[in-house]
Amino acid sequence: MASPALPGAVHDIKAARTHGIIDALTDAGIPCWADKGYQGAGGTVRVPYRGRWHDR
């Protein structure tokens, strides 16, 4: 997916929220895997497990 540039240094999750990408994925029911930088994005966005493997 591509979107217009935002001014300055903007984190990926803020850009995704600003452009409505997370809402669009959720509304369409499309599951999406993202990196750990998207922790807390909500909707259908899933991120990898956030702990250490030996803690499980």
Image (cartoon, rainbow, N blue to C red):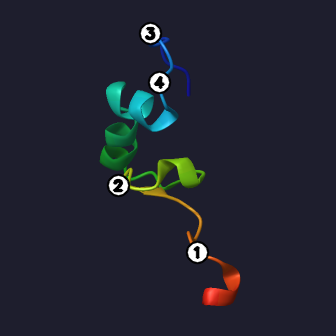
Q: Label 3, on which residue?
A: 7
Q: Secondary structure at mark 4?
A: loop
* Residue 53, image x, y percentages: 68, 82
Q: Quick check: 8 left or right of 29?
A: right
Mark 2 and mark 4 lie on one chain; the one further toward the N terminus is 4
Query: Which residue is drawn at the image coordinates 31% and 40% (left, top)?
Result: 23
Q: Which of the two marks, 2 or 4, is nearer to us in this view?
A: 4
Work out how far the residue at label 4 is from the one at label 3, CA to CA, in angstroms: 7 Å
Disc 4 crowd rating (10 Å Cα; few below 14, some 14-19, many 20+) is few
Give the class, few, some or many, for how many residues have Cα within 10 Å of label 1's Cα (few <14, many ≥20). few
Real-space Cα distance between discs 2 and 4? 19 Å
Sequence order check, earlier mark of 2 and 3: 3
Residue at the disc numbered 2: 42
Q: Is residue 22 left or right of residue 34?
A: left
Q: Are marks 4 and 3 in contact (CB under 8 Å)?
A: yes
Q: Mark 1 and mark 4 in contact (Cβ < 8 Å)?
A: no
In the image, residue 15 sits, relative to residue 51, either above or below, namely above
